[in-house]
Amino acid sequence: MKRKEYQTVSHKSSKKSLVLKISIMLVASMLISLTAYGLYLHKKAETAAGNAFEAISNREKSELREEAVKPLEDNVSILFVGIDDSEERGQGDSNSRSDALMLATLNNKSKTVKLVSIPRDSLVYIPEVGYEDKITHAHSYGGTRAAIETVEELFEIPVDYYVKMNFDAFIDVVDSLGGIEAEVPYALNEKDQFDRNTVQLQPGLQKLDGREALALARTRKQDNDLERGKRQQMILQAIMKEASSASSFTKYGDVIDAVGDNMKTDMTFEEMKSFFAYIKDGMPRVDTLQLDGLDDMSTGVYYWSLDQESLDETRDILKTHLGINGDSSSYTDRSSESEATEFASDHEHSN
């Protein structure tokens, strides 16, 4: 080989080597940055979880459980409580009504979720006071414990954990994710969280900020509590979808800040981390359930009178998903395996 040709080959080889070295350095830098950011998020989340932790006195587990559940091993249930404890309405956390109640059951084997929205005006038995009333009043009668016991009484299943957020946290979480995509069913004119300004939306699929998402979740002027529950389920799913997307990784710090002091839960940080298994492969399958009923003004006060057949069917679905026998305390592997088989079949069909 001639000297000039050798120098050219050598020069090209040197350039390739340099590009390779730079690429490796860039990748290494990115990995170091991501690791550092991950550690930062972990510490930040751990601190936020510690501030949000609020155990219910003398309630280490549901009375319907023989022993406390382990999220990494067991099927569990979580009650989401949305409250309006704004100063504008003269309320505080201790006497606020629940503006939204949603119960989620999580099947550990299939990594699927059942989500049922409970209409706020549902006429149910409230153990705290010993008589029937609107379920929205349970929280104002006895706080989180009363709300949990009322839901356990309604569905005859244990509530293992609760997550309680006010309107400020909801708005800030949606905004920190950069908004969510949701279907607005009709032209909307709804008061904002302060009951001052009006939020106006046109029908159609669109990107909503936190203030707009809250208005859509709360309104019931043009429909009823059942439709309101469907919208709240849709919005919660939209938040989960956005949060589980890879593009939201860099937003998690803001999400943690958004939750801040506006959320309370009896889940420890370690228990919270267990639930990441449900989103490690992306958005999990979420089946939404509705409680059918009728408008009832027979007493002169408006109630949502639950349809017994619909309630019984929902109870059975939730019990099966949790793998619970009739005694509401034991697990059946067969139920979990059935759920996993159903999920695999549906997944195969969708592909």
Image (cartoon, rainbow, N blue to C red):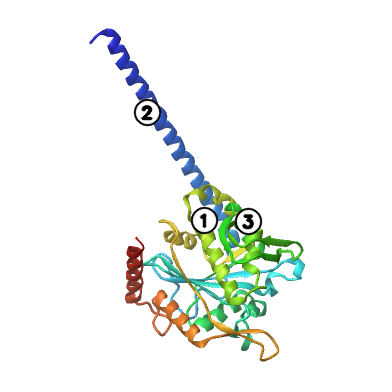
In terms of image quadrants, where is residue 180?
Answer: bottom right
Query: Which quadrant: the N terminus?
Result: top left
Name the residue tied to disc 2: 20
Looking at the rendered image, the disc whose residue lies closer to the viewer, 3 or 2, is 3
Crowd around label 2: few <14 · some 14–19 · many ≥20 (10 Å): few
Residues at badges 1 and 3 in contact (C-beta under 8 Å)?
no
- Distance CA(mark 1)–CA(mark 2): 35 Å
Between the residue at mark 3 and the residue at mark 2, the CA separation in whole angstroms equals 43 Å
Q: Earlier in the sequence, mark 1 or mark 2?
A: 2
Q: Position of residue 231 (x, y in %)?
A: 57, 68
Percent x, y for residue 70? Answer: 43, 68
Q: Of the residues shown, which amino acid type is indicated by label 1?
A: Ala
Residue nearest the observer in this picture, 189 or 293 = 189
Q: Secondary structure at mark 2?
A: helix
Which residue lies under the disc numbered 3?
Answer: 209
Which residue appears farthest toward the top when viewing the image? Answer: 3
In the rendered view, tell whether residue 302 sits above or below residue 239. below
Q: Amino acid at mark 2?
A: Leu
For disc 1, the marked residue is 243
